């Protein structure tokens, strides 16, 4: 069966279609995405402005049509911190549903961390033992730890790379003072969250998910994505410290010459590096392992597990032919 997952993140809006069935690994079939930093559309009062809402609605319509054209049987549509923390988040969700018929499910920070952890556990298996997973998004930073399929602790803090860049690193390149102040803020925000993990034991595997971690690992010497998902990729804390220092002296346009850095990520790479560096320091680990599965895969795998008990799917309402939707209205 063909399943779709529509991810409305803070940096990117992304539809992933996979072919899968219960008990099998999901195999990517097609992908449709667009850089869309909703954080950049925030007004001073924390609301997403009309231009941002229009861009979002247009993409959801594109994704709906893409999924229908490729005969997806089910579409999981969700949003994370950018809409979750917007002051007009409910109004934005209502507008998207009204104009596209697609209902975006709003995930809490804890749910986002838990579902990402679930994917990491499935990727590494039971033999990995206790896992600590770290995920740097555009608007928030998620952490989760556990020995089972779902974590014992899953938490989220507002330390997304795009958010921090907007709020703290307005200059290009940033001043030494702004970098120092951001480092101090990151550690002050992280320390209480890290204390939630006290007494849980030591992780056998520290995993890093998200494009930010993949980019940082790549510039530190990890294999490119073209080498495939099964190549072991690690990010050493020592390398991270060196590169954070180097990146802080670069303009965004110069960062584009680094391997694995896209135009959409170049501006926020430093903020992501500072969060990663602080997290490894506070959790007292010297390295982490890059995991290719994250939130989208976690939601797909969870949906497949549900099908074991609920049986075959009927065509999702989102994916009905347009004329059928018009008739229903």
Image: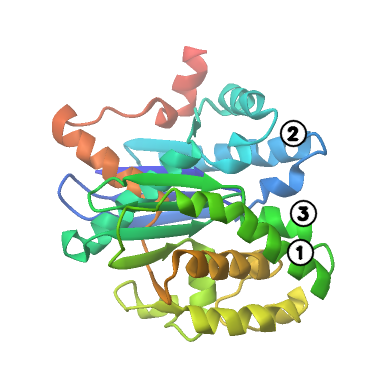
For marks 1 and 2 on the same chain, the one whose residue lies earlier in the sequence = 2
The residue at 67%/56% (across/down) is 162
For marks 2 and 3 on the same chain, the one whose residue lies earlier in the sequence = 2
The residue at 27%/56% (across/down) is 121
Percent of width and height locating residue 109: 49, 41
Task: Say few, some or many: other residues with alpha carbon within 10 Å of mark 3 (under 14 / 14 to 19 / 20 or more).
Answer: few
Q: Nearer the viewer, mark 1 or mark 3?
A: 1
Which residue corresponds to mark 2?
A: 47
Percent of width and height locating residue 133: 39, 58
Quadrant for the N terminus, please: top left
Query: 153 left or right of 166?
Result: left
Q: Is residue 89 visible?
A: yes
Percent of width and height locating residue 222: 44, 82
For marks 1 and 3 on the same chain, the one whose residue lies earlier in the sequence = 3
Which residue corresponds to mark 1?
A: 181
Q: Nearer the viewer, mark 1 or mark 2?
A: 1
Residue 167 numbered tag: 3
The residue at 35%/43% (across/down) is 299
144 to 99, vertically: above or below: below
Could you give the CA–CA distance between mark 1 and mark 3, rounded to whole angstroms? 11 Å
Could you give the CA–CA distance between mark 2 and mark 3, rounded to whole angstroms? 15 Å
The residue at 56%/37% (across/down) is 61
In terms of secondary structure, where does tag 3 sit? helix
């Amino acid at each position: 069966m063909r399943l779709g997952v529509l991810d409305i993140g803070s940096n990117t809006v992304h539809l992933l279609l996979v072919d899968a069935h219960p008990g099998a690994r999901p195999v990517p079939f097609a992908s449709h995405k667009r850089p869309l930093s909703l954080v950049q559309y925030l007004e001073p009062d924390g609301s997403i402005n009309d231009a941002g809402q229009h861009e979002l609605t247009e993409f959801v319509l594109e994704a709906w049509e893409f999924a229908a054209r490729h005969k997806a049987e089910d579409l999981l549509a969700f949003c994370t911190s950018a809409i979750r923390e917007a002051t007009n988040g409910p109004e934005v969700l209502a507008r998207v549903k009204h104009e596209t018929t697609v209902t975006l499910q709003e995930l809490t920070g804890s749910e986002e961390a838990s579902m990402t952890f679930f994917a990491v556990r499935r990727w590494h298996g039971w033999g990995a033992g206790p896992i600590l997973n770290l995920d740097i998004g555009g608007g928030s930073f998620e952490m989760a730890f556990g020995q089972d399929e779902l974590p014992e602790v899953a938490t989220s803090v507002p330390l997304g790379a795009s958010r921090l860049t907007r709020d703290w690193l307005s200059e290009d390149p940033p001043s030494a003072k702004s970098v120092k102040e951001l480092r101090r803020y990151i550690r002050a925000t992280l320390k209480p969250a890290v204390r939630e993990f006290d007494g849980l034991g030591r992780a056998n595997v520290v995993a890093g998910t998200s494009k930010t971690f993949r980019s940082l690992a790549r510039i530190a010497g990890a294999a490119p994505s073209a080498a495939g998902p099964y190549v072991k990729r690690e990010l050493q804390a020592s390398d991270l410290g060196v590169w954070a220092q180097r990146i802080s002296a670069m303009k965004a346009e110069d960062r584009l010459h680094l391997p694995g850095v896209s135009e959409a990520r170049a501006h926020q790479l430093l903020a992501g590096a500072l969060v990663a560096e602080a997290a490894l320091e506070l959790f007292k680990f010297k390295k982490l392992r890059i995991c290719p599965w994250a939130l989208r895969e976690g939601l797909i795998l969870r949906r497949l597990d549900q099908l074991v008990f609920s049986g075959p799917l009927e065509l999702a309402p989102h994916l009905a032919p347009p004329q059928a939707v018009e008739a229903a209205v």
